[in-house]
Amino acid sequence: MYKRKNMNIMKSKILLMMLLLTVFASCESQLTKTPDFISEEVVFEDKSLTEAYIANIYNDMLFINLGGQAQLDMGMIPAAGAEHINFANWQTPNNTYRRSYTAASGPGPLDYWGYNSIRDINYLLENIGESSTFDEDYILEKTNEVRFLRAFTYFQMVIRFGGVPLITSVQNVDDPEDVLYPSRATEQEIYEFIQAELEDILVTMPDGKTGASGRVDKYATLALLSRASLYAASIGNFGEIGSDGVVGIEPGSVDAFYQKSYDTSKELIESGLFSLYNKHDDKMVNFTQLFLDEGNDEVIFAEVFEPIVRGHSLDNLATPAGFLSTWNSNFPVLYDIVEQFDFVDGRKGTDISRDDLTADNSWDIHDFFGNRDPRFRASVFYPESTWQGGLVYFHSSTFYTNEAGERVQATSGTFDRNGEAWPAACHPRNARNTALLLRKKLDESNLEPISGRSGQDFYVFRFGETLLNFAEAAFYLGKTGEALDAINQLRDRAGMPLLTEISEDAIRQERQVELAFESHRFWDLIRWRIAPQYLDGVRTKGLVFNYDLDTDKYIITLKNAEGEERTFGPERYYLPISLSLIADNPNLVQNPGY
Amino acid sequence: MKQKLLDAFKTLSKSFFYGLLIQCFFLTTLMASESNAQIKSIDKAKIRLENKLWRTTELFDFIESETGYVFVYPEDAIDGNSSIEINEEAKTVEDVLKIFAQQMGLKFKQVNNSIYVGKTKELEVLIENVQADIEVRGVVKDEADSPIPGVTVIEKGTTNGTVTDLDGTYSLVVDEGAELVYSFVGFLTQTVHVNNRSTIDIFLQEDFGDLDEVVVVGYGTQKKSNLTGSVTDLKADKLVQTPVTNVKGLLIGQIPGLISNQNPGLPGEDNASLSIRGFGNPLVIVDGVESYLDRIDPNDIETVTVLKDASAAIYGARAGNGVILVTTKRGKAGSMTVNYHGYVATQKRLTFADQVDASGFIRIGRDAVFNGQFDPLNPEAEIGYGTLFTEENLALYESGQLPSYNWVDAVLKKTGSPLMNHNLSFRGGSDNIRYYSSIGYSRQSGIFEGDYDYNKLTLTNNIDIDLSKNLVLTINGQYIKEEKDYSFVSPSTIWNDLQTAQPIFNPTLPDPEKAPYSGFNERSPVARIQQKFAGYSKTDMHTLAGAAELKYSIPFVKGLAIGGKVNVRARNLQNASLRKPYDVWSYDPNSVTNDFDGYTLRASILGNSFSRSYYFGGSNDPNSRVLSRVYATYNNEVDKHSFGVLVFGENENNIYRSLTVNRTDLLSTEVPQVGGTNELTSTSGTGRDIQYTRVSFAGRLNYAYDQKYLIEATLRADASSKFGNNAWGYFPSVSVGWNIANEEFLKNSSLLDQLKLRMSYSQTGVDSNIGNTSFEYLSGFEEITGSVYYLDGAPLPMITTTGLVNPNITWEETTLYNVGVDMTMFSGKLYATLDAFYRYRDGLLRIPLESLPSTFGATLPQVNLDSRSNRGFELSIGNQGTIGDFKYDISAGIAYARERYENYQEDINFDDPIQVQFDQLSGRWVNITYGYKTDGLFNTQAEVDEYLEKYTIEDINGAPKPGDIRYLDLTGDGIINRADRYQIGYGSNPDITYSISPRLSYKNFSFAMLWQGGTRFNVNISGLFRGAFNNEQIPLTLHDQYTWRQDPNNPGVGANPDAQLPAFERNGTRPWNNIQSDFWMYNGTYIRLKTATLTYSIPTSFLSKIGLSNANVYMSGDNLLSFNNMGIFKNAVDPEEATSANAFKLPLLRTMSFGVQVGF
């Protein structure tokens, strides 16, 4: 018995020793754990890591707003520019025009403050030269590529805020205060920086064309230079200098900017590598295919998407109700922009007076919409647009004469119209807002338009815009003949009668129609300093369609598309700098008017 | 706790007879000569001793063998090596013992045939035999009818007495008119007149107010009277009789200062959030290891202890928010006891907002369209009511020609959601091996009318083995298997669908294989909750925990023990999720023809996907955790000094591993596979493999003088792998206590039983400020998972920086001061505890915004930056007593806690007085909310015009219309802007919480209630509650009742001037009404009857016939009644779960249950 006990004690002592060992043998050394990171040292020694680093910079670029719930932000700039709104007010893009713009409320969803990208780019610029494995050519190629992206980032900021701090090197936490707390450069300095950077990289960029597959090239650089110079010129031409130049462009440099835009557009035109897309005889089909026939010669630079792998949700969001989809009808088009589209027979869109849109008149839908600019038919769904083998309906009710000979209005049931089933009313979703929907860029062949299954590329720069930039710059440089010619190239491609003379209004209207819903109008209205005319004190309109089965015509009436008037004071040519940014850095002056 | 103590005593006395001994030394009442008429007094009993050197134990053995006396003594009383020479051969036992008493410093007492041995410095007077008049016999039992051994029975006013034996029986010869006093530690002393009776059976009641309990504290136990910290403990019997499936629910309202929010969830996921004194998530320790409260079977819990102050400091870097200690049940020597506890329950939904019917939907929809489109400048303009909100539809639904449907009832059970729970446990053991084993099973199906089932199996085995006299092996083993069998979608998606489900569509189609259309896109809440449509999410979680501890009491040094423990906890969570496509259909019985079945396809959910995951249970929940610990303890008493020392070192390693593979475009959803080669198939995966380790050393010293003056000091050093070079931190604490009632001047107070003053100071930390697997002190690049960028026709992977490094990152430091008083009065009838605390937290992590402006271009790392303080108090008070067969125990608690920003690195412009007033945080209470002051709604266009004439509007989106909220110009400057805000309320957590819990019993019936509530907090009404049609949501009945309306024939004038909700539009709430204002703030004060339980104990007389030792049946209700201040939201919002008061979230449930507890 006694021995047994001892044995137990022996065993337990051994056990205790083992325990002690487990605890103490493993202390300090175990406190160091390995993270699952890639070391900073190897990134610029390995091309696949460098490419992955640059791909991330591309991915962070604001080529197109794709954020928000289900990528709803793609409707952001068109909503701000009163082209199309979003399905309902809880969707972020509608807050671009429903919110107040004050110093306290800040820039809201239109904000863009791209200094994280700037830092990533500056980091590459400062470090890739140290690489012991890359050759000079590769380093130059990559340097040029990210300098373009840096210029693009500054362009996206300058159109929002005017002058912003110009930062061209990686900041460190222990840098001096004047580096860490920079003041805003003037708007002029930012545009000049963009111009100088782009001109500098153009010198060493090869002639190869890679923009349509997403990679920055010489022509994307020219296109950005064309657009940025045109913006700077028009701001100098129509705007005023404020806050010691933090906003505004010197009038004295206007011509030089127009000239730079003109020259670079011309270089693009004369490169012979780009042309307006014109593969299909049917003008409406042609304009539709322009956006689906990816990599065509009109595309200068695109953000590339592929279904599933890198897909977006445009078809899912925009397909009209009544067709296979899970979301649909999200981008109601405002009647205000419809009026910008003229008729193929030369009638102006505004020739149809709003006063005539009453219950007393009825309209042939194929004339009211179908005889407009083919670009309209390719860009907007309207009653009886054809889609995926069916018709898109927008009517709220159907009038007909019943068996008793009474004329009655129906909202439910199905009628026979020339042997085809005719629903008494459309799907509620289609009529909920303006009863017109965005069609531009939608892919009719996408029969499973769920989120992430749309692969249409977003064209950041296309040759159509180059011609418009060229026409506009030429016009202000007094080269009206060249301007008229460029506009007529576009009208000819679109299937619209050619103009015989050119005017500021004609150039602007053509730009709004050609580039409708492509996130241009809002910025154009601002740089032309005419935004209040379209966006201030305006209650935007939608339509109400009631179909008359007896006459095959529509009664078309106006309705308010938005609950309130839009407001847009002159201070809104620039977004307010948010209070928190100024609190962080008191050297940032607020924009005028806030 | 008391029960545990009693059990411990019983166990001891049964096994070793030590219980009696303990009784003798603890009780001062048994002063001297106790005798028994039947047994020879030791001065009469003679023995013959061999003339030699006798060792003490040797002598005792000899006397025992010769006389039938039994010696009872603690090991440490006897010096086993010394011996005494005895010369005379024949002596009385008394004489022999006297020699030993004098030479060895021992004292002896004879009680019956037992002789108790203790240490003394004086010569002890030995026992005399007193003759008495009558002999009284009897049995002493507790309330559970179990005999209590070791109860002291004394004839009042004399030194005559005895103690009960193992069966609780006693006999004593006393004077005829005597009174007998029965006393036992942990029980109320009872006095009884003999009145010439010869048999007196006594039932002793537990003494709830006694402070001599043993309480579980960090890394050990402590006598409650010697505690110096703020420690609240909860007994097992208070825990089990509330039928909830997880432990957190049990703690609500039970511990003053423990603040909770109820978060109803899917079955198996309902979880209250807990915080001690509003501090944040406490550290949870189960049987000595960091663990989780929610998975333990409440039946297996012996005690829950909450450490609120310096008492938590032994846990160092993790203890800053307090510690909850859970101890599971362990075995007891003795014959096996078997206990069964089971209940079945049914759950009913509370606080759920009802939707309007079809006619209300059309009518309110028309109002909303009108509110949006009406243009006072162009009043004749046509209002486009679209195709839905037409006059025709209004007439059809109002007249009842077309039916209305209720989707809420189709999706949510009104009542009858079943819940059941069974636990069978076995407890017992021999002298050397003691065991507690249990098997628990619970099953719950949720509140949804669809497929959401949960079941859980728990197996527990706790075994203690005495390997030798000094060596104890403790083994814990636990296995938990949980299965969740859910429909694919989460509640948020179901709510999303339900919110927009129009009452004009039928949720129940004649063909159950078709999913019903709900009026908005492809949404169909009824389909979402069914696996046959939506697909499934099946989760299996296995938790395997095992611990082995070896404790060795070193024989040569009294009071010294060393030990080691290894604890392993492995979790394995597997999930398989299948998302299926389905179509949604509407059905019109009137349109059925020979060619048409009446079903119209309205929309489809497209695509499918299948994923398999193997992963840890949560962001900080590792797959495996191995903790190893070695320790040494030393306890000793010298005269009036008692010491306790604990030192230990421990190492904990956590491994986090996960793997998820996802596939879309399955060939078939019938047999889902993650593998596939179809080029459309997209298979992607994510995973990780990271470890986190902690190393700690700590020491604790306890000292008490004469049970009056108490001091405890601890020091802990912690190192954590997530803090890089700043791994080590040192956390000291000291606390003192003064048992004032033990002082001479109070010792004889008839009023006061116990009075103790406690004070403590501690430094602890919070290391959960960053995730266990973060590497904030290192930087690099990581690959972005799940997305690519297309360049040159090829998808490219992307890498991104992990961000800037903070090499100095470390834990938050917490300094805590606590003062407390414990008091018991009137023989335990009145008891109270009061604690007050102040806590200062420094080094709170935050991204320093101001130090570097955003143009820096990188998100700065978190830095130990800010400080905050908390202060508050807790008071608990109780009263208990007995009136005949009626017994009561009423306890109540109130706690107050509030937090303040001390130093906050501000992110404001100090030149802007408005920002300074409203946005500066330093020196401000944390839980205050600013907003606009409001004065009802504009009822007419004229009121709006007058307002706009008078005031300029800044900082508020939109412009007011009739039916909108009127904001007041508090500054009087004619401008309505952010300067006009004021404090509209507190935060969403109560500053003050209170509870009252009466427990009453009469004969075999007992009734317990727990009322619990909170005040000084606000509920901010948000989302759908503010107005319908946000996100296309269907109006609620409360919108119909209380929303401002205008008559289209008289636009601009309110038809219901007393409206309490602003007008809304087809797009929902107007931005004007959506800003933070007092209009939406409701006082959250509430009190609820959290639980009420009625128990019937089946009489022992009946039970003994069927072989049971005890049996109870009970009825219990949870969330039975509640009262709040929520006005029109009274029945729609529960303040306790109101962190965001938006309509449609999982409702609180009322649980009604019936349970049985049986023991044999």
Image (cartoon, rainbow, N blue to C red):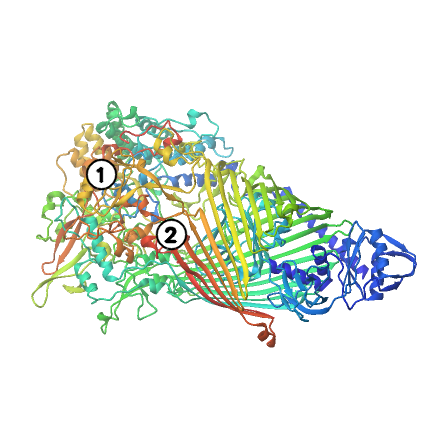
Q: Residue B911: x, y in percent?
A: 36, 28
Relative image position of residue B290 (x, y in whole percent)? 57, 51
Q: Nearer the viewer, residue B986 or B562?
A: B986
Q: Which type of secondary structure does the marked residue at label 2 adopt?
A: loop
Determine the residue located farthest toward the bottom in the rendered image. Answer: B1105
B81 with respect to B608 (left or right): right
Quarter holding the N terminus of chain B?
bottom right
* 1 or 2: mark nearer the eye: 1
Query: Could you say which disc has been placed on residue A402 in the image?
Result: none
- Horizontally, residue B365 falls left or right of residue B250, namely left
Three-letter code, disc 2 = Ile
Q: CA distance from mark 1 to mark 2?
A: 40 Å
Q: Which residue is mark 2?
A: A308
Residue count near mark 1 (Cα–Cα under 10 Å), binned few <14, some 14–19, many ≥20: some
Residue A148 seen in the figure: no
User: Which amino acid, mark 1?
Assistant: Thr
Return the chain for callout 2.
Answer: A
| A87 sits to left or right of B450 | left
State the count of labels: 2
In the image, what residue occupies the spot 21% across and 30% down?
A474
Decide which of tag 1 and tag 2 comes sooner along the chain.
2
**Horizontal and vertical percent position of residue B335:** 67, 68
Q: Identify the subunit bearing mark 1.
A: A
Residue, far left: A405
Residue A113 position within the rendered picture, expressed as x and y whole percent measured from the top left: 36, 35
Q: Quadrant of residue B850?
A: top left
Give the residue at mark 1: A567
Tell me which residue sits at (38%, 36%) in the image. Answer: B919
Question: Which secondary structure lies at badge 1?
Answer: loop
Q: Residue furthest top?
A: A252
